[in-house]
Each structure stands twice: as C-alpha cells, then as structure tokens.
Image (spheres, rainbow, N blue to C red):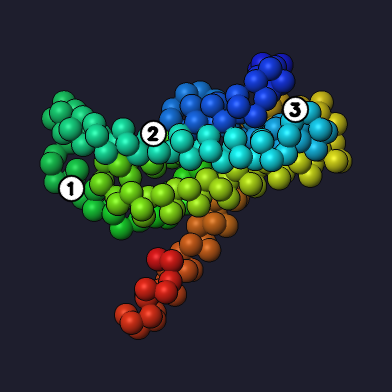
C-alpha cells in the first residue's frame, strides 16, 4: 500500500491526485487523506508544484462531489423507490429521511468529509433530496476546501519535522491514527456548526438572513 501510494504521486503528479480524490469521493477505495498528506509532504520537498497541487486537489474534490450529487439527483430517488419494497422500507420512512436531510443536510455536507462512508454518501443524498444546486455548491465546496486545506497543510508542515518514512509508517501503518484524527476534527466542526445553528434560532427572524444557517 505504501509503495503504491508513493508511486501514484510520483508518476501522475497533481493531475493524478485530482483524479484519485474525485474517484475516492464518488466511491472508489482510495485513501484520500493519505494522498493529501503525502502530497503536502511532496510540496514541501519540492517534488510537486504547490499551486498546481492545491488547485488539482480542490478541483478533484469539487468534481467528485458534483458527480455524486448529479447521480443522486438523476437516479437516486427512482432507485430508492424500486429497492425500498425489496428491503421492506415503507414509503413513510423515505419521506422522513428526505425531510431529515433537507433539515440537516448542510451540516452533513460540511462534516461528511471527515467521516468514512459519509464522505461518499452525503453529496449523493443531497441530490436525492433535490437540494438546490446553489445551496449544495456553497456547503459541499466549502467543506471540501476546508478538508483539502487541512490535510494538505498537515503534510506540508509535518514534512518539515518528519521524514517520509516516518510519515508513511505513522499514517499507513497505524489505521487508528486517521480514525482518531478525523473523529476529533469532525467533532470540533460539528460543535462549531451546531453553535452557529443554535445562535441563528435565538435571533429575530429579520436578522436570520445574515447568518449562514
């Protein structure tokens, strides 16, 4: 695994990084965070261009969530309705799930990148629930920008203090490390988002348009 990831970075550079990130978000078994961290390290060492790598990572993640959203919007709900009877899911549950995503989908789009599985599903269900494209783009692209910046930045700055062998051993040899880091990060973001949402409920209706939730 370690050698395969490094080979991908060295062979395909920033363009390959963007494609792999898009594929990982759509659903392919790609270690997205590992790619971002090691790409950040490569930027620090001068093996990958900073501007090109950052742009490729942003565009790759944007492309991935957009494809997932469009798939959900076009085929998601018909597929769900066809599969529901076989899975013994009542129509009422589908309606309730759609209403729930309409209410909390913005939060899910922001923090879903840090939770394995939810990263691949959040944009798809945004499309299924027919979330407006502008709303989806605002929260999905905003969440992707933060996610990419966090892990690219981690690799870039950690690369100044650790060797590549130490980083590979830490991030790939210890799967629990990523789970702990992403869980803590998602928890912090969730607290911040919920605090903003709660503050929005406390202000008068005339002031709500100025708040993000």
Residue annotated with mark 1: 95
Sequence order check, earlier mark of 2 and 3: 2
- Residue 118, percent from left and from top: 43, 40
Left or right of residue 152: residue 94: left
Q: Residues within 10 Å of mark 2 (few under 14, many from 20)?
A: some
Q: Residue at x 71, y 45 (%)?
A: 153
Q: Residues within 10 Å of mark 1 (few under 14, many from 20)?
A: few
Q: Which residue is more in the foreground, 48 or 204?
A: 48
Left or right of residue 5: residue 26: left
Residue annotated with mark 3: 168
Q: Is residue 68 above or below residue 146?
A: above
Identify the element where label 2 is drawn.
helix
- Residue 12, percent from left and from top: 65, 20
| Residue 182, visible in the rendered structure | no
How far separated are the C-alphas under marks 1 and 2? Answer: 24 Å
Left or right of residue 191: residue 124: left
How far separated are the C-alphas under marks 2 and 3? Answer: 30 Å
Sequence order check, earlier mark of 1 and 3: 1
User: What quarter of the picture does the N terminus occupy?
Assistant: top right
Q: Nearer the viewer, mark 2 or mark 3?
A: 2
| Residue 48, visible in the rendered structure | yes
- Residue 64, percent from left and from top: 45, 34
Residue annotated with mark 2: 67
How far separated are the C-alphas under marks 1 and 3? Answer: 45 Å
Q: Which residue is more in the foreground, 87 or 210?
A: 210
Identify the element where label 3 is drawn.
helix
Q: Quadrant of residue 135?
A: bottom left
């Amino acid at each position: 695994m370690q050698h395969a990831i490094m080979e991908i970075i060295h062979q395909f550079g920033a363009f390959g990084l963007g494609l792999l990130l898009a594929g990982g978000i759509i659903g392919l078994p790609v270690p997205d965070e590992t790619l971002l961290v090691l790409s950040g390290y490569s930027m620090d060492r001068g093996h990958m261009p900073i501007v090109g790598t950052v742009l490729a990572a942003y565009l790759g993640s944007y492309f991935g969530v957009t494809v997932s959203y469009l798939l959900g919007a076009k085929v998601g709900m018909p597929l769900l309705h066809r599969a529901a009877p076989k899975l013994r899911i009542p129509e009422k549950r589908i309606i309730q799930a759609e209403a729930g995503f309409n209410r909390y989908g913005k939060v899910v789009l922001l923090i879903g990148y840090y939770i394995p599985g939810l990263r691949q599903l959040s944009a798809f269900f945004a499309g299924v629930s027919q979330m407006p494209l502008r709303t989806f783009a605002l929260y999905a692209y905003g969440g992707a920008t933060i996610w990419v910046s966090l892990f690219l930045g981690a690799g870039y700055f950690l690369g100044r203090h650790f060797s590549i062998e130490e980083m590979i051993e830490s991030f790939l040899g210890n799967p629990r490390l990523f789970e702990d880091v992403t869980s803590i990060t998602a928890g912090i973001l969730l607290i911040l988002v919920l605090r903003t949402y709660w503050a929005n409920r406390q202000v008068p209706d005339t002031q709500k348009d100025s708040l993000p939730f």
